[in-house]
Image (tube, helix red, strand yellow):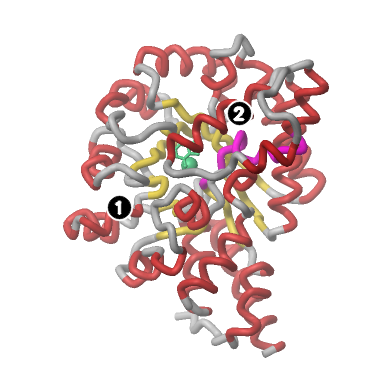
Amino acid sequence: MYTVPQIEAARLPGLLRAMPKAELHMHIEGSLEPELIFALAQRNGVALSYADVESLRAAYAFTNLQSFLDIYYAGASVLLTEQDFYDMAMAYLERAVADNVVHTEIFFDPQTHTARGVAMAPVIQGLHKACVDAEKRWGISSQLILNFLRHLSEEEALQTLDEALPYRAYFSGVGLDSSEVGNPPEKFARVFARCKDLGLRRVAHAGEEGPPAYIWGALDLLHAERVDHGVQAVHDAALMQRLKDERIPLTVCPLSNQKLQVFPDLADHNMPQLLAAGLVATVNSDDPAYFGGYINENFVQLFAATGMGSDEAYQLAANSFEASFVPQSRKQAWLGQLQMAFAEAARQS
Ligand code: ADE
Ligand code: ZN
């Protein structure tokens, strides 16, 4: 049994930044920084309804999920070519490496692009090539997870799956995102059943703004192996017990929750409660270009606001490896690296 070294509070931010970690909930379109949005708009001759980078950034004052999604889909409208998708993903992967992310499972929203006349090929191939090049250049491993937009119909999701299947080798799983309330998981039961038959891994956003019933639905009707967000689970004791017993991970996104007013004050975030209940909770950035920080910023601000310490830091990093879709042997190797990072921090303390 491993005993976590206790690291003094002043050294905790450094440890949070230095420790190896996996990121499992990050929408690649949400990593588009305003500067890159304007650069791509210019390269592609796309008109934007904001005059410059500053006025676009000034519009990032969100009241709920939908107020964010409206701006997020507008930002994605500059993406047209394989090179655009490649550049966007390389920028994220380089940033993730700087945060000591050793593995990432990247969400992408093909329907946001195919609906504008962009073909599936440049989307998936551009993202895939970036994943390959980033691993060669920086050693970071990645997988792609295709997300269906839940505000659209299941027929459209099934059609999207068909369009993506020629590139089946390039994505490991599917997910469900976009406007949650009013679009319950049961809407997508057939497409997720088909994905399961195809051997695809399954995740779903549930319990971000929506009720615990949507988390039950994600598990029972979509056969989700991980729940994205899931923070509303605390309102249902039986659900908490199930998540704990079955070790179903939650990919939690603290700065997203703060910016979208799920927990307007980060000090009120329920991460300490999720960990104390024994859940496999993880920290992720969701849409880092829009919510004020990449994964390390999520860790550092969450710990500063809630007063969590080195036990929770270790648990969250270990959880991120456990929750990832990689073979057990790689998880074990990452745990070894994690313990070395803690030993190094303890030596400096
Ligand atoms: N798409 C991008 N970010 C999202 C979020 N936080 N919830 C639902 N859909 C999203
Ligand atoms: Zn998300």
Relative horizontal placement of residue 333, taking residue 174 as reference (left or right): right
Q: Which residues are magenta?
A: 25-36
Q: What residue would you read off at disc 1?
A: 232
Q: Residue furthest top?
A: 117
Query: In the image, what residue type sits under mark 1?
Result: Gln
Q: Nearer the viewer, residue 18 or 68?
A: 68
Res. 131 visible in picture: no
Q: Is residue 28 magenta?
A: yes
Q: Which mark is first along the chain, 1 or 2?
A: 2
- State the SS at label 2: helix
Q: Is residue 321 left or right of residue 90?
A: left
Task: Identify the residue at horizontal 53%, vertical 27% (top origin).
Answer: 109
Quadrant housing residue 144: top right
Determine whether, in the image, residue 69 is placed left or right of residue 336: left
Residue 34, which numbered label? none
**89 up-or-down from 45: above or below:** below
Residue 140 on image: x %, y %:
70, 49
Note whether 191 is above or below 244 in the view shown.
Answer: above
| Residue 170 - label | 2
Which quadrant is home to the N terminus? bottom left
Dot 2 alpha-carbon crowd within 10 angstroms: few under 14, some 14 to 19, many 20 or more: some
The residue at 45%/47% (across/down) is 260
Q: Nearer the viewer, mark 2 or mark 1?
A: 1
